Structure formats: structure tokens, C-alpha cells
Image: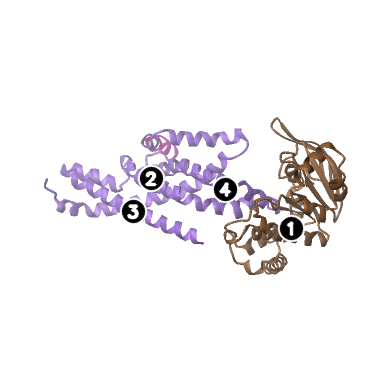
Amino acid sequence: MIKVEKLKKSFGANEVLKDINASIKQQEVVVVIGPSGSGKSTFLRCLNLLESITGGHVFIEGIDITAKTTDINKIRAEVGMVFQQFNLFPHKTVLDNIMLSPIKVKKIDPAKAKEKALELLRKVGLEEKADAFPDSLSGGQKQRVAIARALAMEPKIMLFDEPTSALDPEMVGEVLEVMKQLAKEGMTMVVVTHEMGFAREVGDRVLFMDGGYIVEENVPHELFDNPQHERTKAFLSKVL
Amino acid sequence: MDFRFELIMDYLPFFLRGTLYTIGISLLGILFGTILGLLIGLGKMMKNKILAFPFLLYISFFRGTPFIVQIFIIHFGVVPAIIGTTNGIAAGIIGLSLNAAAYIAEIFRAGIQSIDRGQMEAARSLGMNHVQAMRYIILPQAFKRMIPPLGNEFIVLLKESAITALVAVPEIMYWGRAFQGQYYRVWEPYLTAAFIYFILTLTLSYLLSRLEKRLATE
């Protein structure tokens, strides 16, 4: 579903991703962990080209998204993204946040888009907030709306960029619960997170990144209980 | 000091007509200045530095030279070169528009750049192209933030319009000068002119603050 070959990314002279190779299968939940500055968020943002790529290739369902002929807007419509800072549109109601892209990008009939949006709000448990503005929501609610907004485009892949890092501790659970549900339904997910419990419980595979490389990858219990690399061991000993 | 109200009454019809001219050229200046300013602001934000340079030059020129110099160049140079004769009203409207556009361009640029990068990223991640993201997400938010500085600029423009008296636009200040010339009086014409300008700017700032409040509660 996603194939990453020799991916490199530099910001000026600072090489953040050095040589990333990975492949993610359909319905797989891949969790990316690593110390801050290891390049894990940049890696995720390269998967829908929010960061331009310095070298290498990213294939989404066989399409090279870095190719000049690829319509990146079409790819992005099929790859949902959830941000650490939610990035809800503050001038629009919760419902309009969710309906906007289906109507404007996919040209879906507004009545149908509304129906779908309400259904998604039910799913994330926020139906009663449909007409509220984002400012009046708690962090956890905002993030659940952001997930619903991404799902409204009916994406094939969902990318999560530290979705719980900006939340108060008591709100982390409600967001992880929605993500777990999504994983159970078979969504292909790439999740950058510091929630090791989530990685262990929900992840099919965990990638450990450090210094711009994927240092180690394995099924969760192997990676957490039996890490092979020194750097993985050092990192896990600090966070677990 | 003897203050002769009857002279003011004598000139009142001229002042009232002048007021209509002041309002007219100011509104046209605001209209064209805003449209032009948006385009120039977007031009200056282009990533290609070579393409952006003419817009940068435009803004620097109009912000870096006195308005009176600009309007003389337009009145005695540009307008005759285009239509073959001078035309004060055309020069006044063109001058006000071009001058305001430079400031408004900067207001637009600052407003757009003040919107968090995450908004653009979220919009793009949902499949919107750059134009859609600007239109539905960035500009509506930026516009709200632009209202106070835009209001300021409109008030400045209204006051600057007095300079068009020097290219014979029959607006408030023009009649003030005529008044002074005819009666050799100073207080009556210029206090009257000041009073009218003050009423106009007060009205404008009242309207703008109402707009600001309405947008804030939306």
C-alpha cells in the first residue's frame, strides 16, 4: 500500500532523513517511535508530500507521488492526516469542518455530505457538538473532530502525527479509543506517537527511528521486550 | 477674533458639493486600492524572487515617496500621456488608488502570513488545492485580522484625498482654499474643512468598528 525507497529529506544543510526504506501493507497499523529530532514526524509528512522530498521515492498504491505527473491533490484526498495541533478551521462549525472538503474537493452533494458528517460525529461520540465552533471544544474533542474530518474523505490510509501529544493526560484515552476502533475496522494506519501502550496493544509493527534512519523494526512485543540495537534499548529504557 | 458665520453659510453649498467629491474619490480609491492591493500583496508573496521583485519595487516606490510628488507625476505626466490632457479627478482617483494599494498590499501580506501554517497544511492534507485552501480557509480568517489595519488605511486615504485639491479636484479642501482666496479669511474656511473631515473620519471609524464587532461574533 505504501512503499518508501531510499527516502532522503534535508532542511538546508540539515539532513533529517538519511535513507528510509519501508513498506506498509493494507490494513496494517504501523507505529513509529523514537526520540525527538529522530525524523519520525518528517517521515510521516513525506508520505503525503507536506514536506518536499530531497531524494528517493514514495509509492502510494503503486503511484510514485514524487513524480511530476502525479496529481498530489488526488493522492492527498485518499490519505487522511491528523495533526498534533488539531488544525481545525476555527471560522467554521464542527459540521462545516467535516463537510467542507467532501463538498469542495469530491463534489459530493451537500445533503449527503451532511448525513455522512453526522454519522462520523456519532462514531467519535460528538454528535451534539455539530453546530459548535472548535474554540468551544476541549483538546480531546478537537482531536476527535479532526479524525472525523479526515475520515469524511473516505481515505484508504490514515496518518497520525503525535495525535495525543498536545492533550491533557485525562483526554488521551478518548482519542486513543477512537484510533483503536479505526484499527479494528481495518484502516491502514501510520502513527507517530509516544504512547508506548498504544503501540504495544494496537500496532502490528513498530518502527524505531533515530538520527534519520529506521534503526529497528519488529512486531511490538519483540521490539519492546527484546530490542536488538543499543540505541533502541537506550531509548526504551528511558520511556518505559 | 471676529468669526463670520455668514461667510461659512455663503460657502456651504460649495463645501457640501466638495464633501460629495471627497466621499466619491475616497470610496473609489478604497475600492481600486483594495483590489489592486490584494493582487500586489499576493504578487509579493510569490516564491519566485524574480517574479516577486516588480511588486516589491512597486510597494517600495509608493511607500518611499511623498504622496504629493506621486500625484503631481500622475497629474502632469501620466494622465496627459494617456488621454492627451490633464484631468484632476482622474489623477486624484488614480493617485489615491495606487498609493493606497502599496499599503494595503502589505496589510494583506501580513494578514495572510499571520494565519498558522497548520491551517494550510490541514487544508492541503484534505485534498484541497492551493487556491481552494486560500479561498475557503486562509483568506476568510486573514480578512478578519485585516479589518483594523485596513480601517486605518481607509481613514488615512480619506485624509490624504485633501491633497488632490492641488490638482484642482473640487473637493472640500479645494473650496477651503477658494474661500480663503476670496475673503482673505483663515479661520472660517479651514475650521469648516477640518470639521467636515472630522465628521467623515468619525463616521468611517464607527462603521468599521461595527463591521469588526459583527465579524467577531460570527
- Compute the Cα span from label 1 to label 2: 54 Å
Question: Would you name the residue on which mark 4 appears?
Answer: B115
* Chain letter, colour purple in render: B
| Marks 2, 3 in one chain | yes
Question: Would you name the residue on which mark 3 appears?
Answer: B202
Label 4 resides on the chain identified as: B
Q: Amino acid at mark 1?
A: Leu
Q: Which residues are magenta?
A: B72-82
As drawn, the label of residue A176 is 1
Label 1 resides on the chain identified as: A
Q: Is residue B141 left or right of residue A175?
A: left
Question: Would you name the residue on which mark 2 appears?
Answer: B156
Residue B152, visible in the rendered structure: yes
Tell me which numbered mark, 4 or 2, is placed earlier along the sequence.
4
Q: Secondary structure at mark 1?
A: helix
Q: Is residue A39 left or right of residue B21?
A: right
Q: Secondary structure at mark 2?
A: helix
Q: Residues within 10 Å of mark 1 (few under 14, many from 20)?
A: some
Q: Quadrant of residue A140?
A: bottom right
Q: Amino acid at mark 4?
A: Ile
As drawn, the label of residue A91 is none
Q: Amino acid at mark 2?
A: Val
Identify which residue is drawn at 75% across, 42% down. A238
Q: Amino acid at mark 3?
A: Leu
Q: Residues within 10 Å of mark 4 (few under 14, many from 20)?
A: some
